Amino acid sequence: MDVRVGGAWHHVMQASDGTKITLDFVFTEVDPPKRLSWRPAKTHQNGPASLLQTLAFKDLGDGRTEWELVALAQTFEQRDLAARMGLADTVTKGLDRLSKNLANP
């Protein structure tokens, strides 16, 4: 990950059936420690929806951080495609695994 505006992020997701999906993103906003935004490096005709994703962080004190992830589609069709592809479920499962790993270092 080249975490700077215009920097690249190459990401490979693996589904439970072993299928691998390769994704390339470009960072559009880097504002430590508040916000991080990215979008696909290119759109694919039959690939994942082209979403601008923004992760915002809020320091709650006592070593706690609140975060919010917003995925913004440019069209209703892109939004619906992301929903059909299970974006919310995929993100939730990944974050559940991350939480478990952070809780048990």
Image (spheres, rainbow, N blue to C red):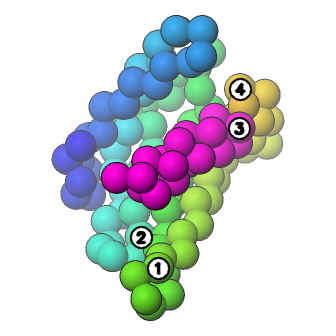
Q: Position of residue 11 (x, y in %)?
A: 36, 30
Question: Is label 1 in a helix, a strand or a loop?
Answer: strand
Badge 1 or badge 4: first in the primary sequence: 1
Question: In this orientation, which residue lies closer to the viewer: 7 or 96?
Answer: 96
- Left or right: where does residue 51 sit relative to residue 59? right
Question: Is label 4 in a helix, a strand or a loop?
Answer: loop
| Residue 101 vertical position relative to residue 41 in the rendered view, above or below | below
* Comparing labels 1 and 3, the label whose residue is closer to the camera: 1
Give me the disc on residue 64: 1
Q: Who's the residue at 60% across and 9% down the image?
A: 17
Q: Position of residue 40 (x, y in %)?
A: 45, 37
Q: Is residue 91 magenta?
A: yes
Q: Are marks 3 and 2 in contact (CB under 8 Å)?
A: no
Q: Position of residue 49 (x, y in %)?
A: 62, 32
Badge 3 or badge 2: first in the primary sequence: 2
* Comparing labels 3 and 2, the label whose residue is closer to the camera: 3
**Disc 1/disc 4 C-alpha distance (Å):** 32 Å
Q: Are marks 1 and 4 in contact (CB under 8 Å)?
A: no
Question: Is label 3 in a helix, a strand or a loop?
Answer: helix
Residues shaded magenta = 87-105
**Disc 3/disc 4 C-alpha distance (Å):** 9 Å
Residue under label 3, please give it.
Answer: 89
Give me the disc on residue 85: 4
Q: Amino acid at mark 4?
A: Met
State whether residue 50 appears in this view: yes
Badge 1 or badge 3: first in the primary sequence: 1
Give me the disc on residue 35: 2
Where the N terminus falls, by quadrant?
top left
Q: Amino acid at mark 1?
A: Arg
